Image: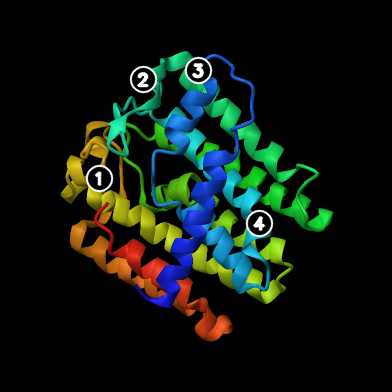
Amino acid sequence: MSNAAQRLEEHRTLVEEWLRDCFREREPRGDLYDAMYYSLLAGGKRIRPVLLLECCRLCGGEPAEALPFAGAIEMIHTYSLIHDDLPCMDDDDLRRGRPTNHKVYGEATAVLAGDALLTAAFEFMLDPSVKLPPERVLEAAGILARAAGGRGMVGGQVLDMAGEGHSLGLHEVEELQRLKTGALIAAAAEMGCVLAGGSQEQRQSVRRYAERTGLAFQIQDDILDVVGDTETLGKPVGSDAKSEKTTFVTLKGLETCRELVQKLTNEAVDALTCFGLEGEGLCWLATSLASREK
């Protein structure tokens, strides 16, 4: 494993440990916390929190101080997956190789677990124990709020549901994915830079990197929904076709999409020029995401 990959793995380990402990002292509320932990600790790539911590380091900050924000963005991502799997949305039975949250705890508890993760994210970011300048804390929390709401992820989910059974154009699909998937990924990078007190040039660089990486990630996801298998992916394949969703693959074809993933990844790497060799970790991350099989 390269030094860059090792550093990102260390970030991931920090996030896993923080997430494991974050609700440990809470008083039980039925099976609410069990349901929250069931999805929060179900594995996953932890792309968003790792990206946040590495961007914080890259821009001169201390990753350990940004852990509550890394955990918060993973909580919001997890809540979105719980709600996305519900019968009223994608109606999926499998997530990360296990039954989805509502299949284990019931629909009502799954909704509440998602709600609780969303609100807990802001509780942890705004906790008085956070040892960062208040203006950075507020700006980072604002970035996440915008990326997670109607101007970001939630807005993208609305467009996704509205597009089922309808033919969409390329611009509409790009906008949908920019909001639904890309917004949180871009927010992670920008939050890391803000928390570190990075420069405007650094902020623009990491945001462009994340936007290109996020789009490449989604296109690769569309590819895997066609050519992947359920056992490897840990979730059903062919769900886009089943829901009659327009994707990058249906618009451009597999081969063109593969070329586009590579082009976007190259653009992401180019965006990091101002960091020199220090950007090696993010370059490795973009490349590994582009070539992933799950």
Where, quadrant-wise, is the N terminus in this rendering? bottom left
In primary-sequence order, the first of circles 4 and 2 is: 4
Whole-percent x, y for residue 170 in the image: 37, 53
Marks 4, 1: nearer the viewer: 4
- Report the Cα–Cα distance between label 1 and label 3: 28 Å
Q: Is residue 175 visible?
A: yes
Tell me which residue sits at (71%, 48%) in the image: 142
Residue type, numbered disc 1: Leu
Q: Earlier in the sequence, mark 2 or mark 3?
A: 3
User: Which residue is at the far bottom?
Assistant: 276
Determine the CA span between mark 2 and mark 1: 20 Å
Q: Which residue is mark 2?
A: 104
Mark 2 and 3 residues: CB-CB less than 8 Å, in contact? no
Q: Is residue 268 visible?
A: no
Residue to which mark 4 is pinned: 66
- The circle drawn on residue 21 is none
Expressed as whole percent of the image width and height from the top left, the position of residue 51 reads 52, 60
Is label 3 in a helix, a strand or a loop?
loop
Label 2: how many Cα within 10 Å (few below 14, some 14–19, many 20+) = some
Mark toward the start of the polypeptide (3 vs 4): 3
Q: Position of residue 42 (x, y in %)?
A: 39, 38
Dot 1 crowding, Cα within 10 Å, few <14, some 14–19, many 20+: some
- Residue under numbered circle 1: 233
Q: Amino acid at mark 2?
A: Val
Of badges 1 and 3, nearer the viewer stands 3
**Left/right of residue 66 with respect to residue 240 in the rendered view:** right
Residue at the spot of label 3: 31
Crowdedness near tag 4: few (<14), some (14–19) or many (≥20) residues, C-alpha within 10 Å: many
Is residue 290 rendered to the left or right of residue 83? left
Hey, what amino acid is under mark 3? Asp
- Mark 4–mark 1 Cα distance, whole angstroms, equals 30 Å
Q: Which of the pair 214/56 is nearer the observer?
A: 56
